[in-house]
Image (tube, helix red, strand yellow):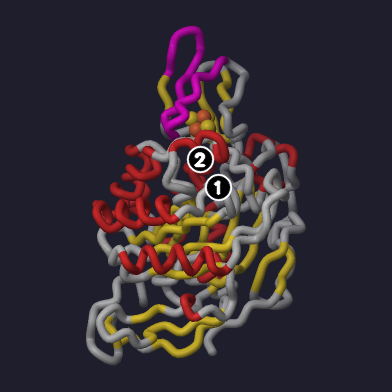
Amino acid sequence: MRAAAATLPCLAGCGLASATSPGLPLLLPASDPDAQFTVEAKYYEKLDHKKIKCKLCPRECVIDDRERGYCGARENRGGTYYTLVHSRVATAHIDPIEKKPLFHFLPGSPAFSIATAGCNVNCKFCQNWEISQVRPEQVRSTYMPPMDLAALARQYRCPSIAYTYSEPVIFYEYVSDSVEAGHAQGVRSVVISGGYIQQEPLKKWCHNVDAIKVDLKSFSEKFYREVVNGELKPVLETLVTIRKQGTWTEIVYLVIPTLNDSDGEFKAASLWVKSNLGPDVPVHFTRFHPEYLLTNLPDTPLETLERAKAIADAEGLHYVYVGNVPGHPAENTYCPKCRKIVVERQGYTIGQIHLKKGKCGFCGQTIPGVWT
Ligand code: SF4
């Protein structure tokens, strides 16, 4: 067995639960003068009367002087737009990469996982709402500049940094600088995102980051409007662009009882993935647990997840997983040609791996992913 999960408190002191690596101390002393977190934003347009238009995500907030955008993490000061969360880490943990989940990316490896406060959508089912739905000054944060972040990842033997938990798009500049700092120190970077981002900043990320996991929260504009406060179309465009640019990607579809769990929606999403991204992009149908504003709904029944998988399999997708059900056989990676298990999983624990240079160890079929 390669990796086993154990509980670990947040390394930045946020109190959220996490996993792996025993006995790590708090990383750096907390310090909070806002100036050290304030860096000019990369994507915005100056308008008349000191207004600006943010060009980072499809929301395109138009913001008056001394006001903030929807995400609460960016502020207009005298006609110049700033991120307020550069190096402002609200939570930090060492997680198995399988928890992101990324199943075709360095299996069994730990990812140094961080987030800042804020988000550009408001999902009613958010699992991390304590940090995603607040402003940066409302949570305790730790100053962790990119070089230090990369050094800490190395120190704790993490081959990758994961930007995760809240929404990395809203700490875009910090991610971009940390990706570079990480690469300079031999550490890779993975972005765990809702994919609600404009094309120009996305393409820049595609050139630099090593993998992007995207949440496809449903296949319905109505759901995105009513449950996410976002839009589906830009997320689909994001997926197409990532695929075209050749960056490794996997999709998570969180299955929520009564809201996005119909056969028709599973079928439409699977067909779209196959036609627009190809059959080799992994899709994880993941179990919902009641959280935040959706505590009235039950956990996703196992039969629903298995139905989603059966539909996606029937549409011809090669790597369809069932998530948040530890021990389920659909956690394993199967070779699409000989059907043998090439990566064995149980929860976050990795068992046997039968891959040779990215090919099935039994029949030689290429298994796409980032394996070394
Ligand atoms: S990143 Fe924030 S400020 Fe910019 S458009 Fe999106 S929500 Fe608005």
Whole-number angstrom distance, CA of label 2 to CA of label 1 = 7 Å
Residue drawn 47% across and 58% down? Answer: 252
Secondary structure under badge 1?
A: loop
Q: Which residues are magenta?
A: 46-64
Looking at the image, is 112 positioned above or below residue 129? Answer: below
> Measured from the top left, where is residue 17 in percent x and y?
72, 63
Which amino acid type corresponds to the residue marked 2 in the rendered image?
Phe
Q: Earlier in the sequence, mark 2 or mark 1?
A: 2
Question: On the picture, is 68 further left or further right than 355?
Answer: right
Q: Are marks 2 and 1 in contact (CB under 8 Å)?
A: yes
**In the image, is residue 58 part of the stretch drawn in magenta?**
yes
The residue that disc 1 covers is 259
- Tell me which corner region of the image, top left, top right, bottom left or bottom right, holds residue 201: top left
Where residue 87 appears, x then y in whole percent? 59, 47
Q: Nearer the viewer, residue 144 or 58?
A: 58
Reply above or below: 110 against 233: below
**Could you classify mark 2 by the number of other residues whose Cα lies within 10 Å: few (under 14), some (14-19), or many (20 or more)?**
some
Q: Residue furthest top?
A: 49
Question: Residue visible at 49% across and 49% down?
Answer: 217
